[in-house]
Image (tube, grey):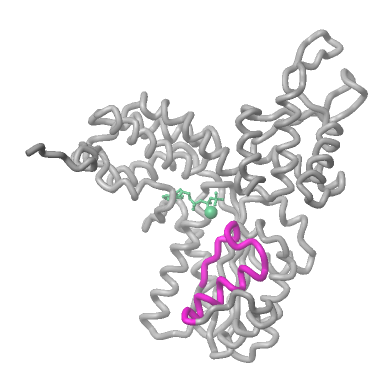
Amino acid sequence: MLQTQNIFEKEFAKETIFLDRNMITPHYTPKVLPFRETYIEDISNLVSKTLKGQKADNLFIYGKTGTGKTSVTKHVMEQLLEFASQKNLPVEGNYVNCRNHNSKYRILVKIVKEFYPEENFLGFSAAFVYEKLLDYARKEKHLVLVLDEIDKVKDLDELVYGLTRCNDELDKGSISIIGISNNLMFKDRLDPRTKSSLCQHEMIFPPYNAQELSEILEQRTEIAFKPDSVEGSAIHLAAAIAAQESGDARTAVMLLLHAGEISDKKGLRKVTDLEVKKAKKKVEEELIFNMISTLPEQQQLVLYAISSLSVEKKPMHKITGAIEVGVLFSGEIYDEYCRLSKKFKETTVSARWYRQYISELEMYGLIVSTNSGKGIKGQTRLIKLGFDAEKIKGLIEKELAT
Ligand SMILES: Nc1ncnc2c1ncn2[C@@H]1O[C@H](COP(=O)(O)OP(=O)(O)OP(=O)(O)O)[C@@H](O)[C@H]1O
Ligand SMILES: [Mg+2]
């Protein structure tokens, strides 16, 4: 009889240099977070008030992407809740990623659903859900709510106002907020009252340097890869690349993950500099695409206008005779943006907000801009896309279609 092999047999038997691949994915929250000890201590200090039956002050954490904000906060919360449950103290927490829950209503529903797992709240009014949250806290509970990527919340002023007001209505029990964002400019959009209540305390996480990233990667390599399967120079190279780009630990971790995958695919027993260099391109693309897909819709539209115009536009002749490719005038982008926002039946923001969005896109490194000087059409702002226009345009088209 013909013996057929299960199609997964071959895949399953493949040699791999990973000991535990999960440990080197960006989703894994490490138990040890070097170079963040003082931040861990400061946050613990703040939230520890709840263990003594008091309200903790609200905290706003800001720092560029991959600086450990989410990992550190989750770690502190885990420890807090573990301690509270061991000592039987009425402290509870809730973590919400506002990228997935981007309005006051959705956030409140997500929170109360965790506090009342057996009930269903979808379809109930915001006021009802809010009352449920209050009822829960009234049982003398001290709640710490972590709102990660808080800049994604459309009606943040109302949310913060509502949650702060809760405390006025509570005799016992309290609600505290830890807001996290990698977008500093978003604070300017907030109502001054929201800003002052959310930012009772502020903390800024700095980027990591190459030395720190090397140590972070060395620790991770030990648990994620089989012994001696990553060359020391490959670790240093990954750290150096990530430090140079942004000081972002996520980039560093992803570089090693992809380098490991490349080695596995080729049946190699080690990760060397070469695999890290190959991984660089892939990681850069992934990070850009990930960033674009998390931008608010209005910013996606501005970026869409820039990429569409860049694809269409002919090279520009400067007065000096030099030729520039892909350089756009700020005004023409705004016109295109207005046209597109109507086409997609979105609201159209004012020119002032548009300039704010341009600054933010530049902060993310998606575009570069300069003042034209006197060479072209008087003084105007010139804008250029930082990455391949066709690719970015295609990606946003997909995003806008969903
Ligand atoms: N101090 C550290 N030690 C070990 N790993 C770290 C450290 N800081 C960050 N990382 C790793 O880097 C990755 C990104 O960290 P994290 O998600 O905490 O960044 P973030 O500041 O929240 O970024 P973003 O603004 O993009 O959400 C995670 O996979 C985490 O494992
Ligand atoms: Mg984060």
Decide which of 264, 198 is in the foreground and name it.
Answer: 264
* Residue at the image point whose x is 56% and y is 71% from the top: 110
Q: Quadrant of residue 173?
A: bottom right
The image shows residue 213 at horizontal and vertical percentages of 43, 41
Q: Which residues are magenta?
A: 94-118
The image shows residue 182 at horizontal and vertical percentages of 61, 51
Specify whether 38 is left or right of 163.
left
Identify whether 263 is placed above or below 374: below
Specify whether 129 is left or right of 16.
right
* Residue at the image point whose x is 51% and y is 38% from the top: 286
Decide which of 87, 320 is in the foreground and name it.
Answer: 320
Is residue 110 rendered magenta in the image?
yes
* Residue at the image point whose x is 78% and y is 51% from the top: 346
Q: Quadrant of residue 328?
A: top right
Q: Residue furthest top?
A: 321
* Residue at the image point whose x is 68% and y is 78% from the top: 125
Q: How many marks?
A: 0
Identify whether 331 is placed above or below 39: above
Is residue 51 rendered magenta in the image?
no
Q: Quadrant of residue 203?
A: bottom right
Decide which of 197, 36 is in the foreground and name it.
Answer: 197
